[in-house]
Amino acid sequence: MPRRTNLDLDLVRAFLVVCEQRSFTRAGERLGRSQSAVSLQVRRLEEQLGQPLLSRDPRHVAPTEQGAAFLPQARRLLRLNDEILAGLGADDIEGEVRLGAPEDFATQHLPAVLGSFARSHPRIALTVTCDLTLNLLDRLSEGALDLALVKREPLGPDLGVRVWREPLVWVALDPELARRDGPVPLVAAPAPCVYRKRAVAALEAAGRGWRATYTSPSLAGQLAALRGGLGLSVLPREMAPDDLTILSDDLPRLEDAEIALLKARGTPPPAAERLADHILSALDRQRSQAGGASPSKARAI
C-alpha cells in the first residue's frame, strides 16, 4: 500500500495567512511567529504537495497558479477542522465580532453565511453594520469594527483580500431613459458611494451629461425610485430585479465590482479570525457553486 502524506494544518494555516497579508513579515505578526519561521512553514507545505505555492520577490508575495488553485481547498480543510472541533465541544472561542458590510452585498450574500456561522459558534455574538464603503473604512480605522467587507476598484488600492467579483450593469424601468436628449437621470446613493462614482466616471468619460434625480443611502429607496421611473442606476448584475431592464446599449461599459475583506489593525481576537475564515470559505463555495456570479433574471436589452 503506497504511503500517504498527511497535510499539517498549521502549515496550511500559515500559507493562508501569507496569501491574505501578501507578506511573510505581516503573516508572522498575525501568527505570533518570526518571518523566517513562517517562510519555512510554507516551504515545508510546498514540499509536501510537490508544488510551488507562492512566488516571492523582495517587494511582493503572491500565490502561483498552483497556489491559487489550492487556496479554496485549504480554506475547506481548515473550515472542516474547525467544524469538527466545534461539534465535539472542543471549541471554546467566545466573544463579540463587529462586522461591517455594504447593504447590497449584505442583503444578497451574507444572511446564509452569517446564519451558518452563528449556528456553528453559538458563543460568538455578531454585530453587523451596513454602510457605505468609505464610512466602513473610517469605522475600521477608528477601532469601531473588527472586520469589514468593502467595495474596491479592481485596479485601485490593494485593500484586503478579494472575496467576490461580479459584473456591474445599468438598470432602469424604461430603457428610453438612456436614449433621451439631455443629462442622464441618475438614481444613486450619496457620495462617497463606489457605484455612484463608477457611474459618474463612465458617463463623463463618454461625454454624457448627468443629473442626480434621486439620492438615497438605502438600497430599498433606490429600487423604489427606479421602479417609479425616476432614472437609471448601476447595480451588480445578479442584484438587478426581474421587473427592471438591464441596459446593454446606449450607455458606457462598466468595470466589474470587487468586494474585499479587511481586518482591524493589530492582532484580531480569535472570534474575529474565526469569522473571517468562515466568510472566505463560504464565499468560495458560493462562487464555485454558481460558477461565478449567477445570471440575473432582469430583462436585458
Image (cartoon, rainbow, N blue to C red):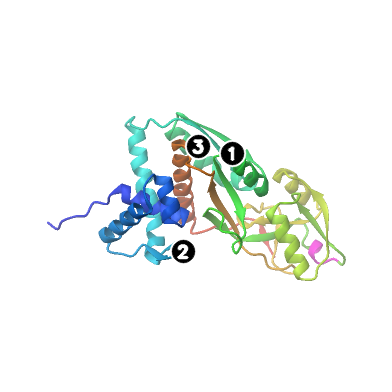
User: How many C-alpha atoms fall within 10 Å of the one at disc 2: few (<14), some, or many (≥20)?
Assistant: few
1 vs 3, front mark: 1
The disc, 2 or 3, on the residue closer to the chain's N-terminal end is 2
- Image quarter (top left, top right, bottom left or bottom right) of the N terminus: bottom left
Question: At 45% across and 51% down in the image, what residue appears?
Answer: 26
Q: Which residue is mark 1?
A: 143
Q: Is residue 80 above or below residue 65?
A: above
Q: Is residue 219 visible?
A: yes
State the separation of the CA atoms marked 2 and 1: 28 Å
Q: Is residue 171 visible?
A: no
> Which mark, by number, is residue 115?
3
Residue 260 lies in the magenta-colored region: no
State the separation of the CA atoms marked 1 and 3: 25 Å
Q: For the residue marked with disc 3, what is the amino acid?
A: Gly
Horizontally, residue 277 falls left or right of residue 221, namely left
Residue 119, percent from left and from top? 45, 33
Magenta span dominant secondary structure: helix
2 vs 3, front mark: 2
State the separation of the CA atoms marked 2 and 3: 36 Å
- Image quarter (top left, top right, bottom left or bottom right) of the C terminus: bottom right
Q: For the residue marked with disc 1, what is the amino acid?
A: Gly
Question: At 62% across and 60% down in the image, what residue appears?
Answer: 153
Where residue 58 sits, quadrant-wise, is bottom left
Q: Which residues are magenta?
A: 176-180
Residue 159, percent from left and from top? 56, 55
The residue furthest left is: 1
Q: Secondary structure at mark 3?
A: helix
Q: For the residue marked with disc 2, what is the amino acid?
A: His
Residue 131, percent from left and from top? 66, 43
Q: Which residue is mark 2?
A: 60
